């Protein structure tokens, strides 16, 4: 086992930093063997099985092509839950966990049943995590991608949560009539302008779904404009909208909501970057 671990680690160190290589190796070996690092150390001289060896060879080949480890292993952790992911959905990020925790902290003591909508759900990590923590909530989620919704539905089933999924193009206002009133609308929509691509890591550009990341340079806030408009007819009087945002577009995004009749709060993430907005109708 130790020999296999060092072989993978040494190969990954050629293309990743030492810290990243260590993390990817640990994650891969735990997935492969089903054992935590401390247990693997106890049996370090035990060789891996032939099947494990074949799997490790396949994993290593993909990892050396810079494919994200989450796609190679088809798993990502979010809010303490393990989600299935593939290249039909974005890999869940820690910043989005902060958005979810903000909602939970603000509404965990709410006595009545909340109705929640996640717009652009992808893997379903947001609505599923909210449902697990806000048990009484009636949770909905929509996405334009049928393939993404299949992943989200698989995650809801495996984690044991009931989510109302809807396949629709949210930017088409004609589809809004399919959705009821909500107390909470949450979204991590596409918000990276196309001209930011040269600043993105190659593994993100090569493997993650571009339609879940990028927006036109001439209209980078297109989803926030739509969400603000949608909220005017689909948000309860005391309801709130929570969105993740581009770190450089905080004031511009706040202005979108202000113009539409909302009062908003801008919140920084753990890296002290403008990352989240909470809005309510005035």
Image (tube, grey):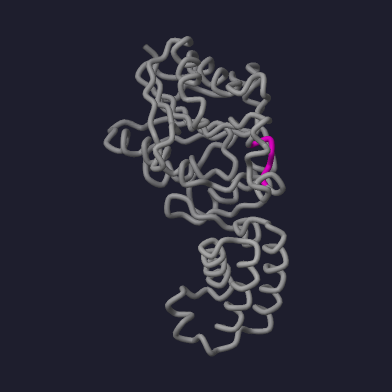
Rendering coords of residue 59 (x, y %): 68, 67
**Would you say residue 113 sits in the magenta stretch?**
no
- Lateral position of residue 191 relative to residue 281, left or right: right
Q: Nearer the viewer, residue 264 or 249?
A: 249
- Lateral position of residue 104 relative to residue 72, left or right: left
Give the answer, above or below, for where 200 lies relative to 280. Answer: below
Q: Residue at x 58, y 48 (%)?
A: 91
Q: Quadrant of residue 6?
A: bottom right
Give the answer, above or below, for where 25 lies relative to 169. Answer: below
Q: Quadrant of the N terminus?
A: bottom right
Rendering coords of residue 45 (x, y %): 53, 90
Q: Residue at x 46, y 73 (%)?
A: 36
**Would you say residue 211 sits in the magenta stretch?**
yes
Q: Residue at x 45, y 25 (%)?
A: 182
Rendering coords of residue 277 (x, y %): 42, 27
Q: Quadrant of residue 104?
A: top left
- Lateral position of residue 105 relative to residue 31, left or right: left
Q: Nearer the viewer, residue 190 or 173?
A: 190
User: Which is the main secondary structure of the residues drawn in magenta?
Assistant: helix
Q: Quadrant of residue 29?
A: bottom right
Q: Nearer the viewer, residue 23 or 97?
A: 23
In the image as oriented, which residue stretches furthest toward the bottom? 45
Q: Quadrant of the C terminus?
A: top left
Q: Which span is picked out in magenta?
A: 208-212
Give the answer, above or below, for where 43 lies relative to 148. Answer: below
Q: Residue at x 70, y 49 (%)?
A: 207
How many numbered circles does the render carry?
Answer: 0
Rendering coords of residue 217 (x, y %): 67, 24
Give the answer, above or below, for where 230 lies relative to 198. Answer: above
């Amino acid at each position: 086992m130790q020999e296999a671990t060092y072989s993978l680690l040494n190969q990954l160190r050629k293309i990743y930093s030492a810290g990243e290589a260590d993390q990817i190796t640990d994650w891969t070996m735990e997935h492969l063997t089903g054992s935590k690092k401390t247990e693997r150390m106890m049996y370090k001289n035990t060789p891996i099985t032939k099947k494990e060896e074949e799997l490790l060879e396949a994993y290593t080949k993909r990892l050396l092509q810079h494919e994200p480890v989450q796609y190679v292993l088809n798993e990502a952790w979010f809010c303490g839950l393990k989600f299935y992911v593939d290249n039909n959905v974005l890999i869940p990020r820690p910043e989005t966990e902060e958005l979810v925790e903000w909602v939970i902290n603000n509404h965990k003591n709410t006595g009545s049943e909340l109705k929640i909508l996640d717009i652009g759900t992808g893997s379903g990590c947001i609505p599923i995590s909210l449902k697990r923590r806000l048990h009484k909530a009636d949770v909905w989620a929509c996405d334009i991608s049928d393939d993404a919704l299949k992943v989200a539905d698989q995650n809801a089933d495996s984690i044991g949560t009931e989510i109302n999924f809807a396949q629709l193009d949210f930017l088409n206002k004609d589809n809004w009539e399919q959705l009821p009133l909500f107390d909470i609308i949450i979204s991590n929509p596409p918000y990276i302008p196309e001209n930011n691509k040269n600043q993105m890591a190659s593994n993100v550009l090569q493997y993650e779904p571009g339609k879940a990341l990028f927006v036109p340079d001439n209209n980078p806030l297109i989803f926030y404009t739509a969400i603000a408009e949608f909220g005017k007819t689909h948000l309860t009087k005391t309801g709130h909208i929570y969105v993740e945002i581009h770190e450089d577009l905080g004031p511009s995004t706040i202005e979108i909501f202000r113009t539409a009749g909302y009062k908003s709060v801008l919140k920084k993430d753990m890296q002290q970057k403008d990352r989240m907005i909470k809005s309510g109708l005035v």
